Amino acid sequence: MAALFNLLSDSTCDFSVDDSTRMGVTILPFTYTEAGKEGGGFHGIDDQFQERTPHEFYEAIRNGATPMTSQPSQLVFEEAFRAALDTGLPSVLFCITSGLSGGYNGAVTALDRLKEELGRDDLPIYIVDCGVTSTGQYLLVEEAARMREAGATAREVYDWALEARYNVRVLFMVDSLETLHRGGRIPKSVALVAGALDAKPLLNFNLDGTLGIVGVTRGRAKGMKKLVRFYAENHGDDYPPVVAIGNADCPEDLERLRTMLLEEDPTVRVLTSNIGPTIGCHVGPGMLSCVCWGPDRRQDKARGRVKGVRQG
């Protein structure tokens, strides 16, 4: 079936080149660089690991690189929108949660400028604030591509996404909170406490799209068991049997987690991805994530507590 609309996402969806090609998704890249370093330090474009492999990227961080990220420029957004309009088809753009980045607001501003320039308020371009990012955004964009293939319109997918983002259940484990603190995503006091405990923090997304720490675990093996339990207790028969897992240069753990999830639920469709450079700059090597469809997060009775996550 011919595409009914253009599907775009910023690079924080953590698609591989094969993913974006197979699903027909245009990726708008973030960039990363080390400020104040001679020659620009460790820098590059979030090009879906074409210039560097995941191991090369994360090994540089292990060896002391401290890159920060920049969202797509106004020019990048405007050029993408002009190219989309030239196709004669409407478009839907998925953006990283506005709780962590200005990317969504930058896209909206670029679209408003284009509307003013063209003298049109009805440009058929819809922009989604995902409310999540990384593997959670992967799950949203992957389902949007499936809906497009089934014949859904741009407006239908946009309206769906504004509700479906609250059904995305995310839990991820990091080795350390230091990189998240350095990027301003986690308070220093929280990072220091987690480091002192030698614990592996477990995080999710709050309703406002910011990060929340919902637990800790002693060791990665226990952490993976918690990720599996999280899936088991948050996924239900009313939701698609699919789980997305991502890894930041820990492919053996990813394969182990995949096996554990299939043992828990042999019917589940498992999607896997590498945590890309943009998110990787903030979480560091070792992140492991588990994302599934579940009940509307707005109906959670206990804010900051996640089903399937217990201490220890």
Image (cartoon, rainbow, N blue to C red):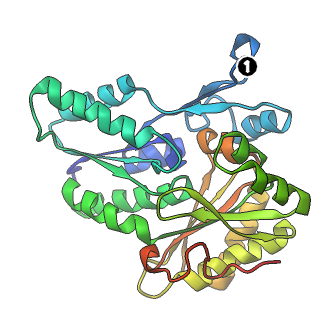
Which of the two residues, 149 or 127, is positioned nearer the viewer here?
127
Callout 1, which amino acid?
A: Gly
Quarter of the figure with residue 35? top right
Compared with 307, 79 (above or below) is above
Which of the two residues, 214 or 149, is positioned nearer the viewer here?
214
Q: Is residue 116 left or right of residue 106?
A: left
Q: Is residue 253 left or right of residue 129?
A: right
Compared with 54, 117 (above or below) is above
Q: What residue is rendered at 69% in x and 37% in y?
A: 53
Q: Circle 1: is it few (<14), some (14-19), or many (20+) Cα within 10 Å?
A: some
Residue 52 is situated, as x and y percent measured from the top left of the image, at 68, 31
- Residue lying at the far front of the rendered structure: 189
Local SS, label 1? loop
- Residue lying at the far top of the rendered structure: 39
Q: Quadrant of the N terminus?
A: bottom left
Residue 278 in view here: yes
Which of the two residues, 22 or 96, is positioned nearer the viewer here?
96
User: What residue did someone put label 1 on?
Assistant: 41
